[in-house]
Amino acid sequence: MPKEQPLKHNFSQALLDAMRDAFDHAVLASDRTGSILWRTADCKKLDAALAPGGVLSPASLMDQVPGTGDVLLDDGRTIRWHAQLLPRPLPLADPGRPTVEALLWTFEDQTHTERLRRALDDAEGRLRLLSPQLHGIIFELDAQVRIVRVWTSDPGLLAVPEQALLGRTILEILGPEVGRQHHEAALATVRFGKSARYEYELDVPEGHRHFATESIAVSAIDSDEQHAIFWIRDITEQVQIQQRLLETERLASIGTLAAGLAHEINNPLAYMMLNTGELRAEFRRLASDPKFDGQLDGMKASVEMIYEGAHRVQCIVHDLLQLAKPVGQVGPVDVRQVITMATELTRTSWENRARLRTEWDDVPRVSAHQGCLVQVFTNLLTNAAQAIAAGAIADNAITVSVCQPLPNSVQIEFRDSGMGIAEEDAAHIFEPFFTTKQQGTGLGLAICQMVVRSFDGEIQFERGQSRGSVFRVLLPVAE
Ligand SMILES: Nc1ncnc2c1ncn2[C@@H]1O[C@H](COP(=O)(O)OP(=O)(O)OP(=O)(O)O)[C@@H](O)[C@H]1O
Ligand SMILES: [Mg+2]
């Protein structure tokens, strides 16, 4: 067995100690057979595993020099080695072998580095676990504001695929128009540690979305640079709820204004109606008297028109008062009973236009106010009937179906075979005073929406498959 040989050298012990301290790993010299010629004290820790009897093991190490590789020790540690040939032969204290061609080895315990890497992987894994809850994107930007890491719960939120983001700045990805704000915020965070907070809108593969962004400065994991973390949240749903709330508030203030106006108009209107009613009856009587020989026909027609106009104002005032009327106390309501009442109340409007079909599942009672719900269904049935021309009863149908799509919600659907709603009108039908009818006030659907929302329900419109319209009312199941 080759013996460990003392190396004849001119190095002082202090220099050797300094060399050893300069490395946080072991350094040794061997000959071509793997016999150790010299080593730093640290190597002793490796002797049992790597150099039993003063010869490097496994022997296959020698086939790989010069070079670098990993050795897995029995105790689970990973040792990374690096070997190179010394440029000059080393002198030995052996007269039979004055010099030897020597290899310089370094051995570094990777276990600690490996543990750190695993901890980092774990932390990243945890972040990935968390990110679906965040519904957004997290970017890490380096000191040159280039993206170095991306985490997202949903790749559909990224403007471009993840791989195409890495190494590029947000300005390069989104262009100057959309990207400038992000770029400036990123520079402020990376250079001056200034956090940013702002909202913006963007078209992504998932559609048009609203985002909120927050940035903070962090130290880079592997350098002294300052990086920035950008947390971008998808707040589309939140924005939609806010918009709905604003719309509800707007409707409520229109309602209050309308109620005030309607109340003021109602009294003078009542005596206008009474008196024009009497005038109309009188003119009808006089005009039919042969004594006047048609001379009063013109005046009679004028009075008829005044009466008609006043009657129309009365209808509008009636609807406005409905819009502002406080919704009654909510309780458990049987929707089938309400549908039966509404279909009877509207019979004259649909009877000569379409067949009425009802399809209902056995559903629980809903949380609503019966009288108000009758009004909603009456409005929807009247609209459906008004969309169908009179006469062709056999070719037309109004179908009311009831089902329970979710455990806590009941759906009442009104489907008609009428003329449908033009694309450009569909966005406005729930607005107060929007009407396409000569005699309409445009308040029917606005009232329906307000009432249904007051029950924490929802009303939706959809175009019919081949023709007509579908209105769906969703109501919460009563406790
Ligand atoms: N079933 C339907 N088919 C076709 N168009 C409809 C239907 N329901 C509503 N609309 C459209 O929506 C508009 C608004 O309806 P809404 O009930 O609010 O007012 P209106 O029916 O015009 O008037 P009002 O109900 O106050 O007498 C209507 O004018 C019509 O253009
Ligand atoms: Mg209507």
Image: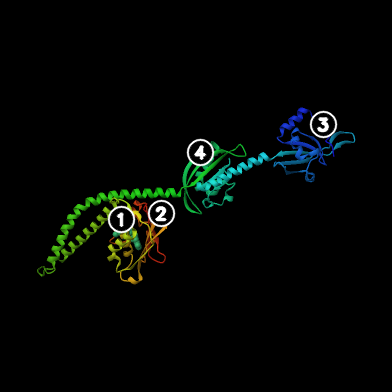
Q: Which residue is mark 2?
A: 408
* Disc on the earlier residue, 1 or 2: 1
The residue positioned farthest toward the left in the image shown: 291
Is 425 situated left or right of 158 in this image?
left
Q: Which residue is mark 1?
A: 370
Q: Which residue is mark 4?
A: 195
Where is residue 247 shown, x and y percent of the image? Answer: 36, 50
* Disc on the earlier residue, 1 or 4: 4
Where is residue 49 shown, x and y percent of the image? Answer: 75, 40
Q: Is residue 405 above or below residue 97?
A: below
Q: Which residue is mark 3?
A: 9
Amino acid residing under circle 4: Ser
Measured in 3D between alpha carbons, the distance from the residue under mark 1 to the one under mark 4, in whole angstroms, is 54 Å
Secondary structure of residue under mark 4: loop
Amino acid residing under circle 2: Asn
Do the numbered discs 4 and 3 sit on residues whose CB atoms are within 8 Å? no
At horizontal 53% and vertical 36% (from top left) the residue drawn is 192
Secondary structure of residue under mark 3: loop
* Disc on the earlier residue, 4 or 3: 3
Measured in 3D between alpha carbons, the distance from the residue under mark 3 to the one under mark 2, in whole angstroms, is 88 Å
Pair 4/3: label in front = 3
Residue 297 appears anywhere in the view: yes
Measured in 3D between alpha carbons, the distance from the residue under mark 2 to the one under mark 4, in whole angstroms, is 43 Å
Is 2 situated left or right of 428 in this image?
right
Do the numbered discs 1 and 2 sit on residues whose CB atoms are within 8 Å? no
Amino acid residing under circle 1: Gln
Measured in 3D between alpha carbons, the distance from the residue under mark 1 to the one under mark 2, in whole angstroms, is 19 Å
